[in-house]
Image (cartoon, grey):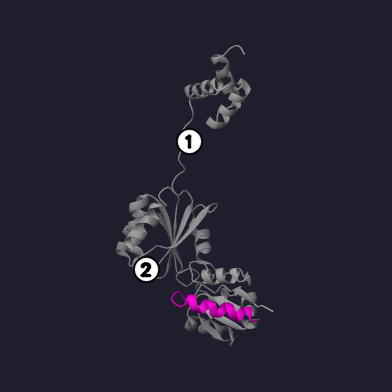
């Protein structure tokens, strides 16, 4: 009988955030696949858990993933953890989940700490619609293309960044989105020195030029303003009505289609239609 893969989120700073369910899953798993076994070992020691650890990270994920899948198919249960937060989110665990899904293995995700959602919830930015963009590429061309694709993005955008790369990232964001674009910089989440700075991209550049950044950052950037829709004029409606009538549509159908296409009230379009052709 095949085993299962459990995705077990780990604290992003405060060890008290580990849930009872996560603890029990780690205890009951046959083995744990960890991004960095040294980091995970510290957590297990804190929890008083002894368990077999398997290294699974970006540079060994291909062959280690195959090995893990075979062990699960053989009946073992694996708990996948990252160094901090939810596995498979901006994390090589994404590939292991795909492998398991392709092999017909049941994957169970346990809710828990996630830096992106934690930062979004306290950012003060719009939370109704957002997109997670993770870490920007260090390659200039890929980085530029990534940001360019987001130039007209209206949803709130979430990025991860390390302190030594923050200044360059803020400059790139400002160049693409403008210095007036609002941003919330969330650092050291759930830790002793947790801090949220709500400012603009220009303000953030100035602030961190004088205050060297420390800790891991989640950047929550406001989306682009919604473009105002142009209201169709009566001349536009008249031109479209005339076109549809010439094509043989009835007045009723022409009015209905024109009103829908131009987002105009049917009564307004009907009055225009009557002025074009008073008699049926």
Quadrant of the rendering where the N terminus is positioned = bottom right
Asked whether 191 or 114 is in front, the reply is 114
Query: Which residue of the protein is positioned furthest toward the right in this rendering?
Result: 1
Q: Is residue 68 magenta?
A: yes
Label 1 element class: loop
Does residue 77 appear in the picture of this structure? no
Residue 229's tag is 1
Are there few (<14), some (14-19), or many (20+) residues within 10 Å of tag 2? some
Asked whether 188 or 23 is in front, the reply is 23
The residue segment tinted magenta is 56-74
Q: Residue at x 62, y 25 (%)?
A: 253
Query: Which residue of the protein is positioned furthest toward the bottom in this rendering?
Result: 50
Residue 73 rendering spot, x and y as whole percentages:
63, 78
Query: Which residue of the protein is positioned furthest toward the top in this rendering?
Result: 279
Main SS type for the magenta part? helix
Residue 192 rendering spot, x and y as whole percentages:
47, 72
Mark closer to the chain start, 1 or 2: 2
Position of 188 with respect to 241 (left or right) is: left
CA gap, disc 1 and disc 2: 40 Å
Quadrant of the rendering where the C terminus is positioned = top right
Asked whether 20 or 146 is in front, the reply is 146
The residue under label 2 is 163
Residue 131 rendering spot, x and y as whole percentages:
49, 56
Residue 230 rendering spot, x and y as whole percentages:
46, 33
């Amino acid at each position: 009988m095949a085993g299962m893969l459990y995705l077990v989120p780990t604290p992003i700073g405060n060890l008290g955030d580990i849930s009872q369910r996560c603890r029990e899953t780690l205890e009951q798993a046959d083995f744990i696949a960890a991004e960095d076994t040294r980091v995970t070992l510290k957590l297990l020691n804190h929890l008083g858990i002894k368990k077999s650890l398997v290294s699974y990270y970006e540079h060994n994920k291909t062959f280690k993933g195959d090995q893990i899948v075979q062990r699960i198919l053989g009946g073992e249960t694996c708990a996948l953890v990252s160094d901090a937060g939810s596995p498979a989110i901006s994390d090589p665990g994404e590939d292991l989940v795909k492998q398991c899904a392709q092999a017909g293995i049941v994957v169970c995700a346990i809710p828990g700490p996630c830096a992106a959602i934690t930062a979004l919830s306290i950012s003060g930015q719009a939370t109704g619609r957002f997109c997670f963009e993770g870490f920007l590429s260090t390659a200039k061309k890929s980085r530029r293309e990534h940001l360019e694709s987001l130039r007209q993005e209206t949803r709130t955008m979430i990025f991860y960044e390390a302190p030594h790369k923050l200044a360059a990232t803020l400059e790139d964001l400002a160049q693409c989105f403008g210095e007036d674009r609002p941003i919330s910089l969330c650092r050291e989440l759930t830790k002793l020195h947790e801090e949220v700075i709500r400012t603009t991209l220009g303000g953030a550049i100035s602030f961190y030029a004088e205050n060297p950044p420390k800790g891991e950052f989640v950047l929550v950037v406001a989306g682009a303003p919604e473009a105002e829709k142009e209201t169709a004029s009566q001349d536009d409606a008249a031109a479209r009505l005339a076109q549809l009538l010439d094509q043989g549509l009835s007045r009723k159908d022409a009015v209905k289609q024109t009103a829908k296409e131009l987002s105009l009230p049917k009564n307004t379009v009907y009055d225009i239609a009557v002025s074009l052709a008073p008699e049926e």
